[in-house]
Image (cartoon, rainbow, N blue to C red):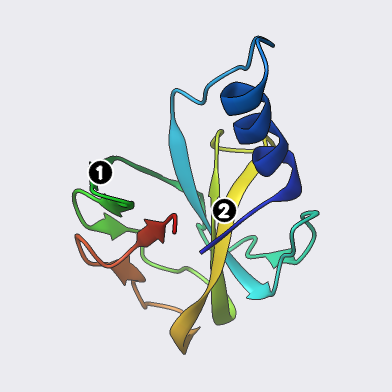
């Protein structure tokens, strides 16, 4: 996953200055049909009972991974083809923290459920 420019700035301020940095206290996973970038953007899924889902992480070494599976509500309309995920600090609006392309894009049609198994969402610093 890549960090957004906003979050990279927060990390650098935390590590290299005495500036006060606001730390996220909640994390939510967004689904995208068009890629976000370091500055945000992209096309987040909307409609069809879609809502960002909360997630918790555990850290081991230089990698944070989701501690439990993340499951979205049954789609009541097509989401389109989900190509990317993003980690936000809010259930709606908020700040993009990190994003990545899915290994395999997934078309979500009416009646489908999108799931990210526990441990499949990894954020690595190296």
The answer to whether residue 90 of the structure is visible from this angle is yes
Residue drawn at the location 56% of the way across and 73% of the way down: 84
Q: Quickly name the residue at label 1.
A: 59
Disc number lying in front (2 or 1): 1
Q: Quadrant of residue 91?
A: top right
Query: Split into 4 quadrants, where in the image is the C terminus?
Result: bottom left
Residue drawn at the location 29% of the way across and 56% of the way down: 70
Q: Position of residue 124 (x, y in %)?
A: 40, 58
Say few, some or many: other residues with alpha carbon within 10 Å of mark 2 (under 14 / 14 to 19 / 20 or more).
Answer: many
Q: Position of 90 compared to 125: left or right?
A: right
Q: Position of residue 9 (x, y in %)?
A: 72, 36
User: Gap between marks 2 and 1, in whole Å?
Assistant: 15 Å
Q: Position of residue 119 (x, y in %)?
A: 21, 61
Q: Which mark is residue 98?
A: 2
Q: Position of 96 compared to 107: left or right?
A: right
Residue drawn at the location 69% of the way across and 11% of the way down: 19
């Amino acid at each position: 996953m890549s960090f957004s420019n906003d979050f990279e700035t927060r990390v650098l301020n935390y590590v290299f200055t005495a500036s006060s940095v606001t730390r996220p206290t909640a994390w939510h996973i967004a689904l995208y049909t068009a890629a976000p970038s370091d500055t945000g953007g992209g096309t987040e899924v909307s409609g069809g009972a879609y809502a960002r889902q909360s997630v918790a992480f555990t850290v081991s070494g230089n990698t944070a991974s989701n501690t439990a599976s993340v499951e979205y509500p049954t789609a009541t309309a097509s989401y389109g083809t989900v190509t990317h995920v993003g980690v936000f600090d809010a259930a709606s609006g908020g700040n993009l923290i990190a994003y990545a392309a899915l290994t395999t894009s997934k078309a979500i049609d009416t009646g489908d459920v999108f799931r990210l198994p526990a441990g499949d969402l990894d954020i690595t610093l190296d």
